[in-house]
Amino acid sequence: MAGATLATAAVRQRVHWTDRTAHIALALLALALAAFLAGPLFAILAQSVEDAKGGFVGLENFTAYFATPALAQSLWNSVWTSLLVTAVVVPAAFTFAYAIARSCMPLKDLFRIMALTPLLAPSLLSAIAFIYWFGNQGVLKAWMQALGIDQIYGAPGIVLSQIFSVFPHALLILVTALSLADARLYEAADALGTSATRKFFTITLPGAKYGLASAAMVSFTLVITDFGIPKVIGGNFNVLSTDVFKLVIGQQDFQKGAVVAIFLLAPALLTFVVDRFVQRKQTSMLTARAVPYSPRPSRGFDLAMTAYCSLVLLLMLAVLGMAVFASFVKFWPYDLSFSLRHYVLGLVDNEAGAAFLNSLKLAFFTSVAGTAVVFAGAYLVEKTRGADWLRPGVQLLALLPMAVPGLVLGLGYIFFFNAPDNPLNFLYHTMAILVLCTIVHFYTTGHLTALTALKALDTEFESVSASLKVPFWKTFWRVTLPICTPALVDISRYFFINAMTTISAVVFLYSPDTLLISITILSLDEAGEPGAAAAMAVLIAAASLAACTVFLGIGRLIERRTQAWRTSK
Amino acid sequence: MAGSAEPFLRLEGIRKEFGAFTALRDIRLDVPQGEFVCFLGPSGCGKTTLLRIIAGLEEQSAGSIHQGGRDISALPPAQRDYGIVFQSYALFPNLTIFDNVAYGLVNRRAGRAAIVARVGELLQLVGLPDAGGKYPAQLSGGQQQRIALARALATSPGLLLLDEPLSALDAIVRVHLRQEIRALQQRLGVTTIMVTHDQEEALSMADRIVVMNQGVIDQIGTPLEIYREPATPFVADFVGKVNMLAATVESAGQVRIGLRSFAGAPCNGSAGRAVRAYLRPEDIVARPISEGDSNVIDSTIEKVEFLGSYCLVKVSAQGMEQQPLTVYLSLNFLSEQNLAAGSPLRLRVLAERMRIFEA
């Protein structure tokens, strides 16, 4: 009898105390993400259906929004400029990516790295540069007007600047998509005597379609949620992101601000959902047996590709170079002699020196704390056992930040942390909240990088450790962490550079004591000092570049110390 | 003695459900101390799941596990007593071979000298005494698997679990290593469970084989029992090659296949019953056949498949044309008799070796 009841009773394995430790850590991570991501987002949702006194008003704020013609116009402006930029950037970046992945163009790596340089500076650097090219005192203003465009301030400036700043993001996605090719498909096509055009339309394009969709949606989202560019070059052309700022900071109309934030959140959320779906498709296309494609030289084609990429880089250098040049001239456009006046003006007279130090501090703390949290979090989700009810929630919260525009996150932080009854209210206006917000803002990319690195490890390491009675953290420390150091360096660099260049989230959260260099660009520009604004943007780019070099050095050093086993034969 | 009758490992009523899918149902198994047991079955039969349940890496939905008299049903892996080797080796790539083997020893706070001695002993045991300073990537697959074995044995566990340890290796290394693992296991006397889908591996290594199919155990027996006396059609078909023949019982010991009757088959009465007769190719012989032998059939060779020292020969027997037979003939015999496709061939069926199953 006893045996029979024993056999039918449900069995639950006792939890080992080391596993219990992992569960507690995982729960803490879930709590932190709830407090610093879910809470602020919920605050926005709540704010959008309340009146100024906090009473529930249903969708009244939304109807009021559409009843304001100027605001409804902004929605349309945002949508069409974003669509236009996407329509230009995706084909342009696809061609560039195709040249890198599928041609024998010389100096490929150089081309690729150069094309990614806009990532080092805040997006509004391009807007400043375009003002110098086509603005009221622009070099080529007459050319532009000859084309029938009256002035750069407004839609033309926004579209041009966005094309420039979004290009590298689309390029990164498309290079990855085009690199994932199976050479055997092309060999089979060749054996059947297929023409190059037919191969392109039947193999290449279908193979990259998910990458194209992803690039298009990322471009659209980046443009519609960007704040710096329309602020600097938008003139009287209103878009959603500038509206949010005006409504919240200018008019203190939190409810309408929350409504606009939700409009910004919607396309990003949609992109996020579609992108997750697309990613799954993309990775499953390439099996472990695939043979990597390597292009064969073809003179005419390679030459055409080189010409195209050179043209793109030339345009890019014209934009970047103009910003650098303008930051060093004495008095645009009358006295073009070399001067450090703008740097002095910015750093000394406008206290940007302190802001620069603040930015470095922010970048450093974000990089260190962010990498630690993100990697530990990814490890807990991917490699520990038990507490399965907790994992999907943590995974969702880790992926969600990608779908939350910086402006929306920043706004949510105001609503959430500025509330007097929030026990975390003490964080408001501190460096800590800037660090936390920036970590959350850029959490997803770091998380995905860490997950990819962890998934490449044998799934049985933890099982072996348990059988040898070694607690999981020891294996984490001795095996997992050393193997993953290249990914750790990537993640910390990503956090550092984004913390240096970000504007959108932190613009709502800084205090006089925690002013950031990227934000001083906005105030300098507003104060009619575009030269100093350019100088500060260049300074950020220089700092990012220096950081990249340092990270590269650290990476090499670590690689030599921890990755010896990879090469030794 | 009552103590010696107690099995080292006892599984009772193990069940595993993944949602609506039942991966294992009512698994009962006793493994005595020192035995080498193979879980054999096609992929998806639940054999790996069962091994992982024994290891505590999966939770059973129901059932109990006792090891060495201790109820380990609800214990986490770290509190059980076993060493495990995976198909992927799972060696830590950034640690040297020495550190890999010492991994579980270091945690037991053994002295440095004791660890060095123990690792040396283990490397000697698996035949790689000089590998200590190398990294896993510098070793071949077979060598890596030996190191994984050494690591699993380092802490002298009471139970060794092997999850398809040889299937990632190429054929020659595999055959070599399976004899080595078997010899090692016998020398150490460690109770061992190995999961495999390779019947040859199971037949050549195991003391007992547990044949599994669709989440249940079809048969437990020695390799010879499994091969000679398969308990179910599945076992007969899965282990070794077999002629599967539709037959009718004529009387006790007498079956008819096609128009031919065979005497001496292991079946009981109730005439006219349709059954399936399973007959191994080697149980149809070409010599010796003498005058007056029963169960002799005349056939024609249809096809000869050359496999090296022996050939797989497909024949069509008189009166059994609907069901061609496969027999093994040595290459020498075929050339001596000058046999090829189309040649006549006289064969004798060892009807007493047939396995008769209900149709």
Image (cartoon, coloured by chain):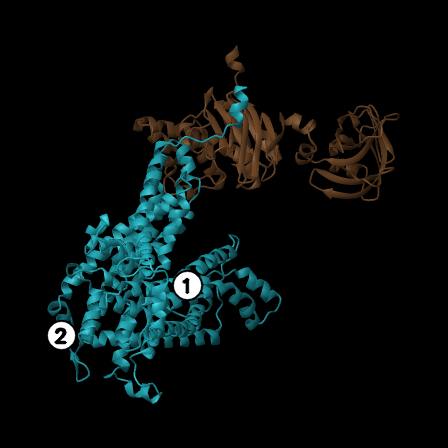
Q: Is residue A442 left or right of residue B358?
A: left
Image coordinates for residue A47, horizontal then vertical, percent: 31, 59
Q: Are marks 1 and 2 in contact (CB under 8 Å)?
A: no
Check disc 2: other Cα within 10 Å, few if <14, some if 14-19, many if 20+: some
> Hey, what amino acid is under mark 2?
Arg
Position above or below: B211 against A103: above
At 36% from the left and 40% from the top, the residue drawn is B95
Position above or below: A548 against B20: below
Mark 2 = which residue? A341
> Hey, what amino acid is under mark 1?
Ile
Q: Residue furthest left?
A: A349
- Which chain's colour is cyan? A
- Residue B177 in view in this figure: no
Image coordinates for residue B16, horizontal then vertical, percent: 53, 34
**Labels in figure, total:** 2
Q: Secondary structure at mark 1?
A: helix
Please identify which colour was used for chain B in the image.
brown
Q: Residue furthest bottom?
A: A146
Mark 1 = which residue? A173
Q: Is residue B324 left or right of residue A256?
A: right
